[in-house]
Image (tube, rainbow, N blue to C red):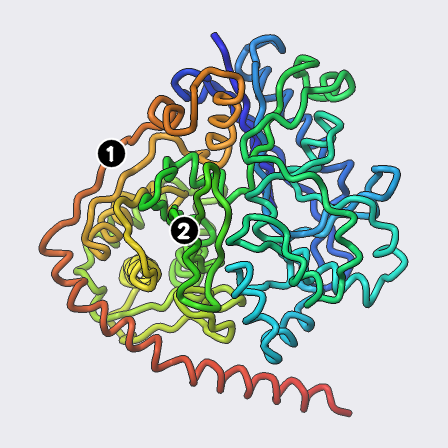
Amino acid sequence: MSHVIGIDKGTTATKAVVFEAAKGCAVASAHRATRSVHPQSGWHEEDMDVTFAGVAECIRAAIDNAGLTAGDVTGVGVSGHMGGMWALGHDNQPLGRAIAWPDARAAGLVAEWRSNGVADEIHAISGNVPIPGVPLALLAWLKANEPERYRSIGTLLFAKDYINFRLTGRLATDESDISFFPCDIRARTFSERLFEIAGISEIASALPEVLPTGSIVGEVTAEAARMTGLRAGTPVVTGAGDAVSAALGAGAVRPGQAVTVIGTSFMNNLTTDRPVMEPAGVGFLFLMPDGAWQRLMANTGGGALCLDWALRAFDLDRLEAAGDDRSELFARMEAEAAAVAPLSGGVFTHPYFNTSGMSAPRFVPDARASIFGFDTATGPAQMVRSVMEGVAFSMVDCYAALDTTVDEIRLTGGGARSPLWQKICAAAINRPLGLLEAEETGALGVAMMAAVAIGRHKDLPEATAAMIRLANTVEPDPALAAIYHKAYPLFRDLGQALEPLWSKRARILSQSAKRQDSP
């Protein structure tokens, strides 16, 4: 039986999953923590050699856990977090540590771009709101602050590209990952104008070859085989950036198909047949295989992170007593929240707990979480349900802002395993939500590409039909949907009314900090 391996190189952990190439059944998996380095406040780096050693160890463990031999694995695909800067010198050796996407060293530069209108032009060309951790900003920062290192750059890669290079020896990237670079999203190629805007036109010579997403980048080398346990000569496909691979692994391959991810972050991804740029200055736009695009409306830290906060703030004793195994606590907590009446006694929560603020459907970095309607009757169960409802309302917010058709939505991520959250989301959006059987959709997405590349399936639609299965479909409860339909405008209007107050709060804090810093 033929097997393929999907590798999801994440910011905090790497996962390798062995799938049957024919039906997509997960046979075994392994994961290893990603080791990051923080040499200064706000910096987020990785030692590239250490990172690849962890990936190699993860691959070997997954093969061993599956009880397979090297010859049983006939294809490999790698997904990786997008953005950041994985620079090699002219000798193809790491040029210092990689800079990962959460890095904030270029925050001041990006703030300047937002104030002088450069960010608007970047979005108009690329469809992406610039954040500090994108290569365009990092390279401009590097040129200004570490010019010698900047001049020493030989090749620029992304996380998954470096893994592919170590596996095959070939320097290349794919369409999906260049989306977060200086990309002309309409032409599906690099944008000379964006290089000019950032003042880094000369770095164009360091750009790698761009291959179609899912094409074969090379074969596993003898050295990589020794480290990973793979067979030398095993085909390796380009893979894709994590947002794209997760959408593919969820089955969102045709225009109109969407996937909502309730993870630490909350992401609403829609596959489109054109570059959807609206709403302007908001969200991200990535290149998908077969000439499609993906419109991503996300709130970083707007998903399960909110629920974690509610438990720490309102149920800390039980949380600490549960220790590392919290499955029983979560089951009890969910049952208690399910017993609470819809709208949690009138408590509305805006789920912007992360310091990045609101990134969709409007870009409001000063936004923070708000709890409206709190009173003495509000307890842990009410807060848990209110957070779930707030996240669901923000999903309605995001999809309503898109000027295109949404035909189908699938739900995945850790939070999607909660039956109560499933029910709340389906009622809030008032449409059926498909629940996926596979949990590791990022790994499955690139494994599907590998299965197509080795000829097991003729194309991605066929691979999707064979390898992706829905575990269930959650239908909206009509009575609950009616309640949320009446309540959503209050959630929406509150958020809009709070925007100037969030900005005022930020100014007050900034002025207070300046006074404290003064001698």
In the image, residue 517 lies at what x, y percent? Answer: 72, 86
Residue 39 seen in this snapshot: yes
Residue 230, by quadrant, is top right
Q: Residues within 10 Å of mark 2 (few under 14, many from 20)?
A: some
Amino acid carrying label 1: it is Asn
In this view, 244 is above or below 61: below
- Split into 4 quadrants, where in the image is the C terminus? bottom right
Residue indicated by mark 1: 472
| For residue 41, side relative to residue 267 (left or right) | right
Mark 2 touches mark 1? (CB < 8 Å) = no
Instruction: Determine whether 59 is above or below 43 in the image.
Output: above
In the displayed structure, 223 sits above or below 490; it is above
Q: Amino acid at mark 2?
A: Arg
Report the residue at 24% width, 34% height from top: 472
Rendering quarter of residue 146:
bottom right
Q: Secondary structure at mark 2?
A: loop
Between 337 and 233, which is closer to the camera in this rendering?
233
Residue 161: x, y in percent? 67, 37
Disc 2 designates what residue? 274
Label 1 sits on a secondary structure element that is: strand
Of marks 2 and 1, the one in the foreground: 2
Q: Is residue 230 left or right of residue 290?
A: right
Q: Does the rendering let one see residue 304? A: no
What residue lies at 50% left-to-right and 75% top-to-bottom? 366
Packing grade of label 1 (10 A; few <14, some 14-19, many >=20) is few
The tally of labels here is 2
Whichever of labels 2 and 1 marks the residue nearer the N terminus, that label is 2
Q: Which quadrant would residue 163 be assigned to in this image?
A: top right
Give the camera-side residue of 30 and 133: 133
Question: Mark 2 to mark 1: distance in Å?
Answer: 30 Å
Eyeballing the image, is 443 above or below 298? above
Can you give x and y, in whole percent of width and height, for residue 121 in the image?
57, 69
